[in-house]
Image (cartoon, grey):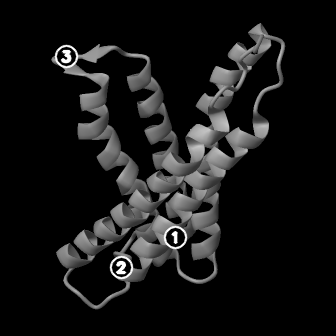
Amino acid sequence: MERAGERARPVWLLAVVPIAAVIAVAFFWAWTSNTPEIGPLDRAQVGGLVGVPLTVAVPVLTAWVAWRIGGPARAILAAIVAIAGGLAVAFPFWAQYADQCADVHMANPVGAIAIVGSIAGATLFFSTIAAGAVLDLDRPRSARLGRAVAATVVVFVVGFAAFALVGPGLFFGQCVVRP
C-alpha cells in the first residue's frame, strides 16, 4: 500500500528478486564445490543444510513475485528464471568438459550439456508453476507457503529422477580416448 508522501514503486522491479536469487544460489553452489570444509561441516552437509533450502526457495519466491506482478508477465518471469537456472546448472558441466575434452582433442558434449540444462530449467519452470498454483488459494499465509514448498519439492524430485535416469547415459565415457 502507498502511504502519504511515498512514491509508488513499479511492481515489475520485484522481477529482479528471483533472478538475483538464481544468481545467488548459483554462486553459493560454486563456492561450496570449491571449498572442502566450512567450519565443522563438509561441503555435502553445507549443501544439504543450506544449499537445498535456498534452491527450493527460488521457485517459491518466483511464484510469489509472479503472483504480485500478475497478468501475462507471470509466465515470462517463470521462463526467465528457468532459463537462468538452466544456464547456471549447465555452465559447470561445460566448464568441466571444456578442459577435459581439450586435453584429449575431442569435442565438448554440447548436446548432453544442453539436455542437462533443459532438465534443470524445466524443473524450475514447472516447480514455479506448481508453487504459483497453490499460492493463489484462499488459505492462511502459512498454509499457502507450506503447500508451495511441498509442490516445489515434488516437482524437484521428478526433475532429479529425470536427471538420474538420463544423465549417466549422456556423460558416460565422454572425452575418453579408447584404444
Which residue lies at the image location 45% right of the left edge and 69% below the top edge? Answer: 63
In the depicted structure, whether residue 170 falls above or below residue 175: below
Q: Quadrant of the C terminus?
A: top right
Q: Is residue 46 visible?
A: yes
- The residue that mark 2 highlights is 135
- Provide the secondary structure element on which disc 2 rests: helix
- The residue that mark 1 highlights is 11
Return the disc, 1 or 3, that comes first in the chain's sequence.
1
Q: Nearer the viewer, residue 6 or 151?
A: 151
- The residue that mark 3 highlights is 39
Q: Quadrant of residue 175?
A: top right
Which residue lies at the image location 53% right of the left edge and 50% below the top edge? Answer: 165
Using the numbered discs, state the Cα–Cα distance from disc 3 to disc 2 in whole angstroms. 37 Å
- Provide the secondary structure element on which disc 1 rests: helix
For badge 3, the amino acid type reads Gly
Q: Nearer the viewer, residue 27 or 87?
A: 87
Where is residue 122? Give x, y as percent: 59, 60
Which residue lies at the image location 61% right of the left edge and 48% below the top edge? Answer: 86
